[in-house]
Image: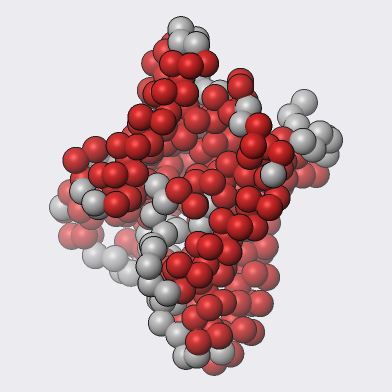
Amino acid sequence: MRNSSFELLRIILILMILVEHANMWFIGSGYHSESEHLAKCIIESVCIGGVNAFVLISGWFGMRGDLKKIGDLMFMLFFCTVPLLLVALGLNWIPLSALASDDGVYNYVFGGSGYWFVVDYIGLLIISPVLNYGIERIDKRQFRRILIAGYALILLYDFVLRQPVLGSEGGYSVLWFGYLYLLARYMRRYGMDLIMRYRWPILIMVVSLQSLLFFGGFIGLRYTNPLILLEAVCLIFIFRNWHFHSKSINTVAAGVLMAYLLHMQPILVPYIRKFLLDRYAALGYWQYMLLAVALSVVVLFVAILFDKVQSTILKKIR
């Protein structure tokens, strides 16, 4: 049976991502007061580590390059795009000519850039057997050197110089996912004594520092940011120490990826953005964010139902 502590973490992480997107991605980074600006920066800094932590969880438990798993993910992706696309074409929301280009197919069939996480995750699945093979054949010292050297390159070229030479693209890449996978395997196998011992103070410190630096315009929100990475590492070590089993939590956690896909659905995104912008204008920031938190919970529970439907259909067509 799955350890529900990590399933609980996955639920928290998807809610963090949904709230983060409502905080800035959908309504923009503008603000009407310094207090609102500070609040936005704090919420972003608290929530931005969610994506890194998701990948670390996969690395913690390990992955296999399973074609069945890849097929399941692709089916889930198409389940979230193709039916609504057919409805949109039938109702003339989208002209058929929109699918005449590669960009149209990419956006409306494969989800466009909004589904980058799933595509990169599939890429990680594909390369995971190679990573696993290497991990089993190196010792702790070699492993540590690889992680330090790898992150030094990523930190220099991607985070500091902002150059695409490594292809890490701020963390939106299979390269970064592969690095996180290796890091998580090291974390589980050998631990990190200092971070494990002071995980809560370190978490509070890095989130506070990231918030202040982001508020002052000194640092951005790239996933390769060392503060954002350290936040995710701390979250893994916090939940690692909790061991319990809950069928309810496991059921809810099954819908987290579907929640991500639904709220980033390419046809729905313009309507979601308009709805949230209207609520932001009507309610003001503070009430709007309370609504955003409530809506994030609603999206998750809707996603659970959608996931049940798509998994049932998948089982029947196998």
Residue most extreme to the top: 137
Residue sitting at 35 percent across and 37 percent down? 152
User: 62 above or below 98?
Assistant: above
132 relative position to 10: left or right: left
> Which sits in the foreground, 311 or 214?
214
Residue sitting at 53 percent across and 62 percent down? 209
> Which sits in the foreground, 167 or 22?
167
How was the colour assigned to the protein in this rendering? secondary structure
How many numbered tags mark residues here?
A: 0
Residue 155 visible here: yes
> Which sits in the foreground, 84 or 21?
21
Q: Residue 246 at x, y = what percent?
A: 83, 39
> Which sits in the foreground, 132 or 269?
132
On-image quarter of the N terminus: top right
Residue sitting at 52 percent across and 74 percent down? 40
Residue most extreme to the front: 194
**In terms of image quadrants, where is residue 29?**
bottom left
User: 40 above or below 300?
Assistant: below
Residue 275 visible here: no
267 relative position to 52: left or right: left
User: 59 above or below 88?
Assistant: above
Q: Residue 244 at x, y = what percent?
A: 84, 35
User: 246 above or below 109?
Assistant: above
